[in-house]
Image (tube, rainbow, N blue to C red):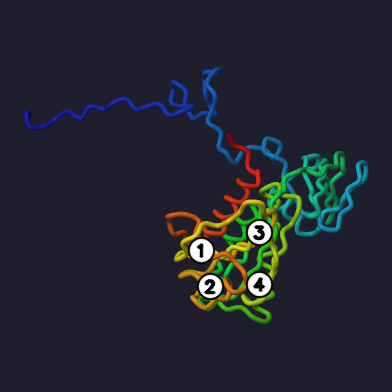
Amino acid sequence: MDALVSRRRLPRKRMIGENAEGSPPGRRSNPNLLPCLPFFSLSVQSMASPRFYCPEADFVVGRKTVLPEEARHHAGRVLRMRAGDIARLFDGRGNECSGPIFFEGPEAWVDVEEVSQPEVESPAQITLVQALVSPEKMDWIVEKAVETGVSRIVVVPALRSMTRLSGERLQKRLAHFKSVVISACAQSGRTRVPEVAFMPFEEALELSADARILLAPAARAAAALSGARSFLLAVGPEGGFDATEIEAARKAGWQCALLGPRVLRTETAGIVAAAVINAVAGDYRFS
């Protein structure tokens, strides 16, 4: 009938990696056609060598270094490394080694083939004084501070902090922060593990550095960085530091400064400030 439209089947588009007969990549007839491989099929050898933290190790070429239990579990159970895969170890004190990893029973070790002291730390000594914020934001701040090159993280309670920590809960959170620091060091290639501490805000104001800067959205002046090699950066919680805290910092000799024309969130302010300091100190390479 004229009212009916003929349903003509259109040719199907060939999928990437599919052969002319429509067979999946594993059954291709054209030997010159490469299949699409899933990214998770890549072997450990094709990626950068994994790094593991061995705080009590003494790296000596020709000897074996036994991995701590957590590192052994991560290498064998999580990364599925095989005997002979290359691993890198760092002691958190500036030393790193590499060599093949081996497993036997509950033990894993690396036969040390090379020991080095990579120059990966920032020439600027930066301490981030971070006011307590929500757990998710704190984890992000700690991780990115390590990646940026911060050498010490001091967590302080502020008047506007919504999170309060004390006693056993505080100790658990500090232990968690330290595990975040170690993971970030392993990922970013750092060889020294930044310290994580907790203290009252008033005590943090007594810490010393060449430049002590409290970031305040209402401030007018820019941070003075010239000539300084050590820095203290204080970042408030959501809503910033209270007026009484800002005044206490001023009386203690801190600069109350603004980074730029835009207001940054608590989780980005300290990271941006640390990046600016590293750029001024020559840590970042650009032209």
User: Can you tell which of label 2 and label 1 is closer to the viewer?
Assistant: 2
Query: What residue is pinned by disc 3?
Result: 231
Query: What residue is pinned by disc 4?
Result: 204
For badge 3, the amino acid type reads Phe
Where residue 37 appears, as percent x and y from the top left, is 56, 33
**Callout 3 touching callout 1 (CB < 8 Å):** no
Residue 45 vs 235, above or below: the answer is above
Query: What residue is pinned by disc 1?
Result: 266
Comparing 207 with 275, the one in front is 207
**Callout 3 touching callout 2 (CB < 8 Å):** no
Circle 2 — which element?
Answer: helix
Disc 2 and disc 1: Cα gap in Å? Answer: 15 Å
Residue 145 is tagged as none
Q: Residue 5 vs residue 187: left or right?
A: left
Q: Residues within 10 Å of mark 4 (few under 14, many from 20)?
A: some
Quadrant in the picture for the N terminus:
top left
